[in-house]
Structure formats: structure tokens, C-alpha cells
Image (cartoon, rainbow, N blue to C red):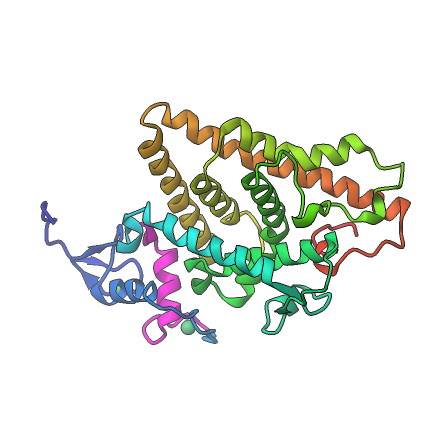
Amino acid sequence: MPSRRLQVWKPCVICKDMTTEFNYQVDSCNKCKMVFRRVFRLSVPLEPCNCSTRRIQECRNCRFYSCINGGMQINSIKKYREKLSLIDSLIALDNKRNSTFFKYQMTEDLNLDQIMSPGAIKEKDEHVIFTSHDWVLMEIYTTIEFMKGFDLVNLLTSRDLKIFIKNAYFKCAIYFIAVRSYSNNLSFMTFPEKVDVFPEEILNVPQYSQLLLNKIRCRLISKFIEYRVTKEELLLLVSIIFCDQTDPDYSMPAKNIISQYQKIYASALFQYCELKYQQSVPARFAELISISAVLVDTITDLDTVVSLFNLYQPTLKLRQLVKDSFPQS
Ligand SMILES: [Zn+2]
Ligand SMILES: [Zn+2]
């Protein structure tokens, strides 16, 4: 530390012990600093904490969440200072996602709780021919697996984790369908072996607007093509989209953790743009962020199609995880 702070005694904003230290952007004692720092070295989730009142002196979890609420910055943890190294871990997660996508199938039509438990998938039988229903389930499964690889997952309680996954899995699975099709140089969303993204049951029903279906298939990818988006940008952008803290059901620490990670991914994207483009970096960054609005539009259109399913083909059975993504169905 080049500039020494004056040795002034102040209460630690977390535990109120007197301290002269300043750690992770707040006045805080050594004990709180250590607890905060060590949590980021854990490779397993914080175990559930049943403290009835917040007893931060005795409980690591309560102290950690108080550190978060007290304003400690995850950003200042050593491993997040080198933002571009986040890209490597995203690429590793993405490779895993792709290999699972092709090699496995879901054991049955599961809901969110079941899909997050062991035994949700099995090795793919080579004779089985996947329909769009099967592919979309694997897209959702591998999206959730990707999300569960994020560091922040270890910091959330199981209740908050469920909200985190529930809010993003469908939206981001659609994003990943677009990413895969774009990587295969296609200009519309499709599953492998030319299986359409929509269930074949609807394709011969004239009431569905082909214009609407095509808009859903193409809009996101046309932006990827227009902006010549790179793989690194696509992965950082989806991470920013995942980290959406707006759900009112989140606990305070969860809101805080998720929004701090969103800023970390956003500054990683900005740094990547600086490195790659040298000029007009803010414009490039804004262009990329604007893609998330196109994803929202695509989901809104899908919502329309799902309400039409209910109207025209009430017997058509969507898979549970798809159905649960739409409030009205
Ligand atoms: Zn303290
Ligand atoms: Zn506790």
C-alpha cells in the first residue's frame, strides 16, 4: 500500500469491534476481512445456516452476509482483479455444456427441483431420435449446469439459488440455441439434425403466424451477425444477463451478491472491448448490451406463441420445464 491511512480507530462496520483497518472498501476489522476473503476460496456452497438471530461473532455465514450487507466489495477480491481471466473459466464451462448437450438425454419429464437433483440425465441411447421437446430439455439442463458453475452459486442460500436459476434458465436456454446456430453459420435458430425449434405438432397448423415464428427464429441471430459478435462477448453477455437481481423475492445479501457479480462481468466485457477494438469502446459495449433487449423481445413473442398453443391445440403437451417458464400456462 503506497499511501498510509491515518491510524484512526473506528468501529468495524460489520461487527462493531474497534479497528484501524480498511478492507474491501469498508472500515472493517481483521477478523471480518479474513472471513470474507476465505469464503471465496471455498469450492463448496456455504452450508445452510439456522441462526435464529444474526450472531455474527460465532457464525461464519452470518458474518459473511453481514460483510456483504456492510458494503464489502467482491470486486476487490484478488481473483476478480484480473477480469479477463474470467473468460477462460466461461469458455471451460461452455465446452462442458456443449459436450453434455450432445451426449446425454433427460431421464423423464422433470420439474426444476428434480432437474437440480442427481440422476436427471443418462447417457444418450444412440438409436433415439430427438424431437424439439427433447432438445429443448437438454438445452435447459445444460444451461442450468452452466449457471451452477458460477462462483456466486456457492454464496447463495438454496432458496436464493432456486430463484436465480428459475429466473434465467429458459431465457438463457433460448440464447444458447441462438449461439449454437450462429456458431454453425446459420441465420435462424434450429436444433441439431435440422430439428426445428418449434414442436412439429404446430408446423402444419395454419393459424400460427409464420411471420411471428420466423421473427423468433431469426431476430437474435441477426443481431449477432450484424455486430459480428465474438464467442467471448457472447459468454460475457449471457453472464451479465444471468446476474439479474431485480426479483423482489431475493434476500438482501443475494441481491447484493448478484448485482456485484453483474458489475464484475460487465467490466470484464468492457475490458475485453478495450483490448480488442482500441477505439469506440463505449459504443461497442452499448451495442452488445442492447442485445439483451432483443432477447427479451424474443421471449415476449414466445409467450404469445405459447398462449396460442393453449388456444389452438390445448392437447399439445409442452414439457414441464418449458410450461413452468410461462406464467399463464
Ligand atoms: Zn469486524
Ligand atoms: Zn448464522
Residue at figure coordinates x 61%, y 50% from the top left: 173
Pinpoint residue 121: horizontal percent, then vertical percent: 63, 68
Residue 122 vertical placement versus 135 (above, below) = below
Q: Is residue 267 magenta?
A: no
153 or 73, nearer to the observer = 153
Residue visible at 37% across and 33% down in the picture: 273
Using residue 318 as the reference point, say whether residue 81 is left or right of it.
left
Near-viewer residue (93 or 21): 93
- The image quadrant of residue 298 is top right
Figure check: 238 above or below 273? below
Residue 218, image x, y percentages: 66, 33
Closer to the camera in the image, 175 or 100 = 100
Tell me, yes or no, whether the highlighted magenta stretch contains residue 62.
yes
Choose top left, top right, bottom left or bottom right for residue 175. top right
Residue 291 image-quadrant placement: top right
Q: Which residue occupies 41% across, 45% down?
A: 265
Residue 202 visible here: yes
Give coordinates of residue 203: x percent, y percent.
83, 42
Horizontal and vertical percent position of residue 289:
49, 34
Q: Which residues are magenta?
A: 53-75
Q: Quadrant of ligand 2?
A: bottom left
All told, the count of numbered labels is 0
Judge from the rendering whether residue 110 lies leftward or rightward of residue 231; answer left or right.
right
Left or right of 117, for residue 108? right
**Residue 252 in view:** no
Q: Residue furthest front?
A: 127
Q: Is residue 102 above or below residue 84?
A: below
Q: Residue at x 57, y 55 (%)?
A: 143
**Residue lying at the far top of the rendered structure:** 280
